[in-house]
Image: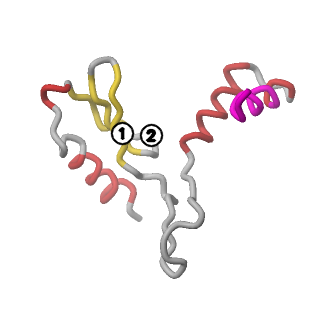
Amino acid sequence: MTARTDILGALQRAGYKDREALSLIEAADKEPRTPTGLGDPEFPTTLEGGHALIVEYGDCEFYGYCQCGKALGTVRPDKFRDDVFGGKWERHVMTEVSA
């Protein structure tokens, strides 16, 4: 049994339907995490903000998106370059996210 299974069971026992419980777990998975014990204590490294560039492979395509959930597109492997999602992600972070 995994912690994820335990959490799902606890949510179901608390009255959440399967779909609602899974939705809560998925939302928690997307939240930024703050690692502990990394780097120089005077300059802490965190993942707060939740805007890392994510590239995944599935269904014979690469999928690009921001950690916050913004989709950046898809591309076939034969068209993939290192910077294929970089420009879209940079525009998102610099214009849509910055305050």
Compared to residue 69, the image places residue 17 above or below, namely: above
Q: Is 58 on the left or on the right of 82, as rendered?
A: right
Image position, residue 44 (x, y; %): 51, 72
Image position, residue 40 (x, y; %): 49, 76
**Is 98 inside the magenta-drawn segment?**
no
Secondary structure state at the residue bearing disc 2: loop
**Amino acid type at mark 1:** Tyr
Which quadrant would residue 54 be assigned to in this image?
Answer: top left
| Magenta-drawn segment | 1-10
**Residue position marked by numbered label 2 in the rendering:** 69
- Callout 2: few (<14), some (14-19), or many (20+) C-alpha neighbours within 10 Å? some
Please report the residue visible at 15 percent of the width from the left and 39 percent of the height from the top. Answer: 81
Q: Is 42 on the left or on the right of 73, as rendered?
A: right
Image position, residue 74 (x, y; %): 26, 29
Check whether the beta carbons of the residues at disc 2 and disc 1 lie within 8 A of each other: yes
Please report the residue visible at 48 percent of the width from the left and 71 percent of the height from the top. Answer: 39
Secondary structure state at the residue bearing disc 1: strand
Looking at the rendered image, the quarter that the C terminus falls into is bottom left
